[in-house]
Structure formats: C-alpha cells, structure tokens
Image (cartoon, rainbow, N blue to C red):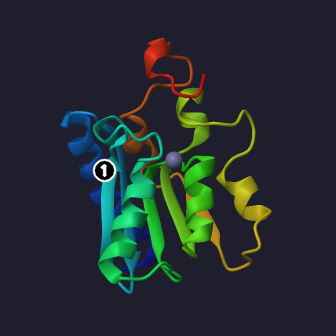
Amino acid sequence: MTDDETSIAYMRRALALAEAGQGAPGSSPIGCVIVLDGRIVGEAHNEVGLRHDPTAHAEVVAIRRACESLGQDNLRGATLYSTLQPCGMCSMASIWTSITHIVYGARRQDVHRMYFEDRHLGVMDILHDAFRDDMSATGGVLADECAAYYYKPDDEPPSDEQANV
Ligand SMILES: [Zn+2]
C-alpha cells in the first residue's frame, strides 16, 4: 500500500471506532488508532462521560492502551490517527509519548469551535514550537466522512455539550 492508502485504511478503522462511540453510553464519536511497526497497538473512542474523566479523549485513551499493552511509555515511530484534529491536550500528550506522526480527518475549519480549547492555537502551532524536529501532522484525510460526525462551524450545539465554555 502507498502512504495514502495506508492513511485511508487506518482512518477507516478510526471512523469505525467513532461510529461505535456514537452509540455507546458516555462516549462520543471521536475515534483514534495508534499504529507502530505496521500494526495497531492501541485504539479507542472518546470515553469522557463513561469514565467521568474530562481527559478521556480518544487519543489519550488510545495512548494509555498502547503504552500499557507494550509495557512502555514511549511510542517513538508510531502514527496516531484521529477522526478529528487533536486538541491541545492530545497534541501535548502525543509529544510526551514521542509519537512521530499525527494524521487526522476533520480539521478545525470543518467543525464547531466547541471541540477545541483555544481560539487560535492548534496542533500545527504546538508541534511547530515543540522540541521535536522529527514530528509531523497531516490533516484532512477522509475529512468529509469524519466531519459528518460533528457539529458544523455554524451549528448551535446545546450549551451542555460545549465543554470548552
Ligand atoms: Zn483531545
């Protein structure tokens, strides 16, 4: 498979996790897959409500599972696939985990601002300023399919769903 085909294949798995998260109690339709040496080492959907844990974003849960399953706290060389552009917390968690590539589907401009914690700073800004010259991020893989799970920029989501205000 080419890199594009690989990204699409793993993003489709992340989309399947998002779908599962949409139907699961206390979960949200954000899916994440972490791949190291050609195999999935951790995956998750958002479990914030389920765990009563505001840090249980799909990326953080997937990182915890990957590190636990491998018995290590470093995922250098791994690629993290997420259906939604990672927030600042998940971008930082990826840096602290030494993840090398971040690939995401829906971009900030594709979704409502409720999914982010900062008005301007995004994953690209955080990576640009990180002590990690080997780290990269690519957005927009299957963007439309991913964005279909989220509120659009001009939607008016219920205020009790907006964790960032
Ligand atoms: Zn996050």
**Tag 1: residue type?**
Leu
Question: Where the N terminus falls, by quadrant?
Answer: bottom left
- Return the residue nearer the eye: 51 or 138: 51
Answer with the quarter of the image where residue 61 lies.
Answer: bottom left
Image point 72% across, 33% down: which residue?
119
CB at disc 1 and ligand 1 closer than 8 Å: no
Question: Where the C terminus falls, by quadrant?
Answer: top right
Q: Mark 1: which secondary structure?
A: helix
Residue 122 horizontal/vertical position (percent): 68, 47
Q: Is residue 147 above or below residue 157?
A: below
Q: Is residue 8 visible?
A: no
* Residue that numbered label 1 is attached to: 15
Answer with the quarter of the image where residue 72 lies.
Answer: bottom left
* Other-residue count near label 1 (Cα within 10 Å), few / some / many at <14 / 14–19 / ≥20: many
Residue 8 horizontal/vertical position (percent): 37, 63
Q: Is residue 114 above or below residue 5?
A: above
**Residue farthest to the right, as pictured:** 129
Number of labels in the image equals 1
Residue 144 horizontal/vertical position (percent): 42, 41
Image point 50% across, 62% down: which residue?
103
Image point 60% across, 69% down: which residue?
96
Q: Is residue 134 visible?
A: yes
- Return the residue nearer the eye: 86 or 161: 161
**Residue farthest to the front, as pictured:** 52
Image point 46% across, 46% down: which residue?
143
